[in-house]
Amino acid sequence: MKNRVAAILIGVFGIIPFTYAESDDGNLASIEQVGTAYQGTINQSGDNNIARIRQVAVNAELDEQLSEGNGTAEITQTGSLNYAELNDFGKSNDIAIHQWQSDNNALVSLDGNNNQVNLDQNGIAQDFIGSIYGNNNELMATQSGSYNRAVADIDGNSNEVSMTQLGDSNSANIQIEGDRNSVAVLQDGNALNYSLGVNGSNSNITITQY
């Protein structure tokens, strides 16, 4: 059985919570929220599912300095061949994606300051792409298993990236544009690969392979 659920929530005042949970294959769940202190959660169990959350803080697309977020977004998927996408415009938001099993894909696109992104993928052949534009953001990504791939593109200052890959034949690609950024990559396994590009000054880079 295939389900398609879309929710568009608009609210400037107060908290906007929305939670969606399903257990089946081939489903699509989409949440779009505009406001402040929003909360969006999607839980999916099964294969070939798609989850999308887009959150826009008040004034975020007009003036970043006036935008307020203070929201949360979380996607959890258990199964294979699933896709998770989070798009966030604003500041001071907490974002999380959890995926288990194999052949899952996660995409995070973030535009704002003082946000925190947590990614956890456990399985085989998982892909993660993160794009962050802004300052003082934190990205923490952990992939456990083999043949996983992580790509992070950061544009801004004083951002912190922590990427951990545990298993064999994993690859990491990090590109950073800006100053005073911190990058830590830990890879534990065999046949590991990483690529790093930094354009800026006063950045702290640590690469560890076991």
Image: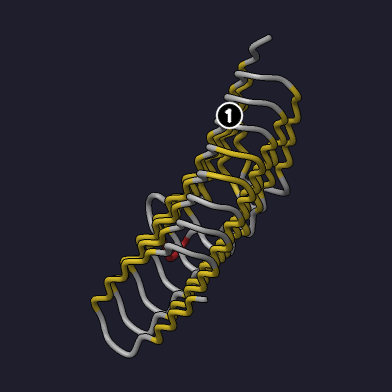
Looking at this view, name the residue that lies furthest to the bottom.
202
Q: Position of residue 29 (x, y in %)?
A: 61, 26
Residue in the image at 61% along x and 51% along y: 121
Horizontal side of residue 125 vs 181, given as left or right: right
Q: Nearer the viewer, residue 135 or 199?
A: 199
Q: Nearer the viewer, residue 101 or 65?
A: 101
Q: Quadrant of residue 201?
A: bottom left
Q: Nearer the viewer, residue 40 or 107?
A: 107
Residue type (three-letter) at the residue carrying disc 1 = Ser
Q: Position of residue 85 (x, y in %)?
A: 51, 40
Q: Residues within 10 Å of mark 1 (few under 14, many from 20)?
A: some
Vertical placement of residue 157 versus 90, above or below:
below
Vertical placement of residue 207 versus 60, above or below:
below
Residue in the image at 68% along x and 9% along y: 1
Vertical placement of residue 28 versus 69, above or below:
above
Residue in the image at 65% along x and 40% along y: 101
Q: Mark 1 sits on what residue? A: 30
Q: Position of residue 197 (x, y in %)?
A: 27, 71
Looking at this view, name the residue that lies furthest to the front.
190
Looking at the image, what colour scheme do you see? secondary structure
Vertical placement of residue 173 versus 75, above or below:
below
Looking at this view, name the residue that lies furthest to the top.
1
Mark 1 lies on a secondary structure that is strand
Residue in the image at 65% along x and 48% along y: 98
Q: Nearer the viewer, residue 54 or 85?
A: 85
* Residue 59, visible in the rendered structure: no
Q: Quadrant of residue 70?
A: bottom right
Horizontal side of residue 47 vs 91, given as left or right: right
User: How many dots with numbers?
Assistant: 1
* Residue 37, visible in the rendered structure: yes
Q: Position of residue 47 (x, y in %)?
A: 63, 25
Horizontal side of residue 190 vs 62, given as left or right: right
